Amino acid sequence: MVDYGDSLGPKGDARFATTHWSMVLEARDGQNADADAALEALCSAYWYPLYAYGRRSGIAPDEAKDLTQQFFQQLLEKQFLDSVHPSKGKFRSFLLATFKNLVKTEWRRANAQKRGGGQVILSIDEQDPEGRYKCEPQDDTTPDQLYERQWAQTLVGRSIGRLKDEWESQGKPFEKLKVYLLGQKGDSPFAEMASELGTTENALKASVHRMRRRYGEIFRSEVALTVNDPNEVDEELQHLLGALSG
C-alpha cells in the first residue's frame, strides 16, 4: 500500500513558502521572474486536463487545441490572476473555472485566434493532444469528472517520473519493480522477481516498501505545488485519490 505520509510538503515545512502556485499568487501584483517561470512550468504540466475537458464538452479537436493554447497565453500574460479568490485557491479549481469562462466568451462567439495567428507561448502540437484523448474511455464521464481524473493522473505521471529518475540515478531497477508500485503484483510474484534480480524475497519486499513510501512522499509534494495553503494538502490529496478511484 502506498504511504502518502507527510514527510514532504506538509504543514510546517518551510520549503512550502516557495512552492509554485503559492509563489505565483504572492507575486501576481508585481514583477517576479521566478513566479513567471513557476507559472509557466505549471501550465506546461497541466494543459491536458483542460484539453480533455473541452473535447468531452463537445468542442472539435482543432478548436479545443486553439482554446487551450489561447487560455494559457492569456494566463501567462497575467490577465486572469486578479480573479483568484479563496474558493479558487487551488490551481486545479482556478484553471477549470477560468477555462469555462473562456469557453463561454470566446468559443461560443467564435472569437478565438485563427490557427497559427499570434504568439504561441505554450505549444501543445508536439504532444499529440487528440491522440491522447482518443485513448480516453468512451463512457458517461462528464467533462468535469474527466478533468478531475486527468488532473490526478497527471500528478501520478509526474510523481512516477520523478521516482524513476531518482531510482535509476542510484542504479536501482525501477523498470523491473514499477509493477509493484501502486499495489499491483501483476504477472510478477515476489518469489519469481527476487530470483530474477538475484536477491531474496524479503529483501525485494523491503525494497518495494521503500519505493512505495518514496512515491507517496513525491506525490504529496506534487500536490503541494498546486495549492496556496499547506493546510489544503491533505484535503486535496484525498480529493485526487477519490478522482482516481471513481
Image (cartoon, grey):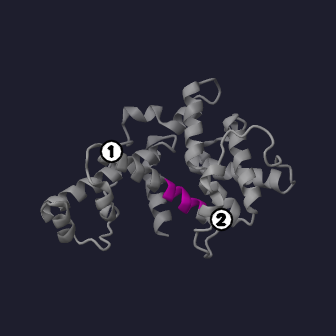
Residue behind mark 2:
143
Of residues 214 and 29, the one nearer the viewer is 214
The amino acid on which the numbered mark 1 sits, given as a three-letter code, is: Glu
The relative height of residue 2 versus residue 72 in the rendered view (above or below) is below
Q: How far across and down, in percent of the image, does residue 88 sit?
A: 61, 47
Q: Residue at x 17, y 64 (%)?
A: 194
Q: Earlier in the sequence, mark 1 or mark 2?
A: 2
The amino acid on which the numbered mark 2 sits, given as a three-letter code, is: Pro
**Which contiguous range is marked in magenta?**
147-154
Give the alpha-carbon distance from disc 1 to disc 2, as whole Å.
35 Å
Instruction: For the N terminus, give its image quadrant.
Output: bottom left
Of residues 124 and 91, the one nearer the viewer is 124
Q: How far across and down, in percent of the image, does residue 180 sit?
A: 30, 64
Dot 2: what SS? Answer: helix
Residue behind mark 1:
166
Q: Does the image show residue 198?
A: yes
Q: Is residue 112 a member of the stretch shown in magenta?
A: no
The relative height of residue 128 versus residue 12 in the rendered view (above or below) is below
Q: Is residue 151 a member of the stretch shown in magenta?
A: yes
Dot 1: what SS? Answer: helix
Residue 70 relative to residue 43: left or right: right
Residue 173 relative to residue 221: left or right: left
